[in-house]
Image (cartoon, rainbow, N blue to C red):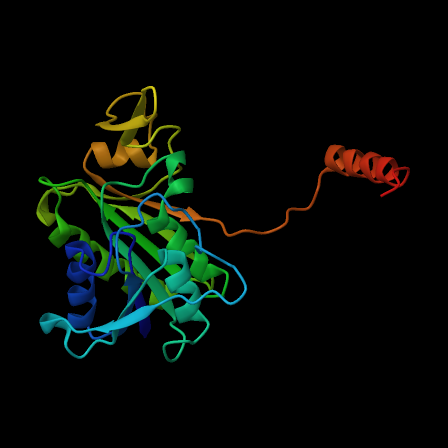
Amino acid sequence: MRILVTNDDGIDAPGLHAVAQALRADGHELTIVAPDVEYSGSGSSLGTLEDGAEIRYEKRLFEALRDVPTISVQAPPAFAVFCACAGLFGPAPDLVVSGINPGHNTGRMIMYSSTVASALSAAGFGVRGLAVSCGFPPDHRFDTAATVAVDAVRWMIEASEPRTVLNINVPDMDLSELKGVRMAPLASRGLLGLSFETGPESIRLLRHANTDRLGTGTDSALVRDGYVAVSALGTVRALEPNAGVAAYLEAGLSLTSRIEI
């Protein structure tokens, strides 16, 4: 299977290399297209969309991945996925793997995660997507997360539907210590907490760990308790309106018909 590996921490990030080496060892055909620098928190941004804009890219070579085509782009990871799935760097991938991110992506905060957005971007092209995260240094375990990612990729190849997107969060512990794998809804709070200090001319961002009020059986709570949390994510699509929404839309349309522009 052709797999695109990307991330939001930059082409040199160790988490990307850990999962790429693990997937390569499992026999997959890889291409790496990732940002040249960190783009954490950029969500699904493509960067500039100005007519005539030129986005620079560079071919890279890493000793441990000498046979893997590797390209860095001066743009967010969603743009890297967009280009790769559009066939700009060779045949389009069958699966996009985003990560391994240092820092769990759980709870509703994942809407801002560019690790998760990269996997979701793939689905727009009918390609499966997998986002993989573990904890922050110095307690992060890329080795455990990479092994889990390989198993998840095998499952996606064998059993998943087109456009399937999974967000996987792995506890920082030995593989033998994991309590299991659980499907999980998103918690109202992520394991990553943010607070802000406002000064006269700047806003200071402060990061802290959330360990309570995570709900029961949510992705955040499961990772905290030693389980691998797997959340299936939906892609962007229009929903069928219910009766109340339909009535609102009809009223709105009749209103706009009286407005002269």
Name the one closer to the observer, 200 or 26: 200
* Residue lying furthest front: 201
Q: Position of residue 146 (x, y in %)?
A: 18, 56
Considering depth in this image, is 54 or 258 the residue closer to the camera?
54
Residue 200: percent from the left, percent from the top?
34, 19
Q: Quadrant of residue 47?
A: bottom left
Image height of 254 relative to 36, above or below: above
Which quarter shows the C terminus? top right
Relative to residue 174, is residue 239 drawn left or right? right
Quadrant for the N terminus in the image:
bottom left
Residue 252 occupies quadrant = top right
Is residue 176 positioned above or below 88 on the image?
Answer: above
Question: Which residue is at 32% across, 69% downward?
Answer: 57
Residue for point 86% across, 35% down: 255
Picture layout, residue 111 above or below residue 116: above
Residue at image point 11% right, 54% down: 143
Image position of 111 with respect to 98: above or below: above
Q: Nearer the viewer, residue 148 or 254?
A: 254
Q: Nearer the viewer, residue 148 or 100?
A: 100
The x and y percentages for residue 103 are 23, 41
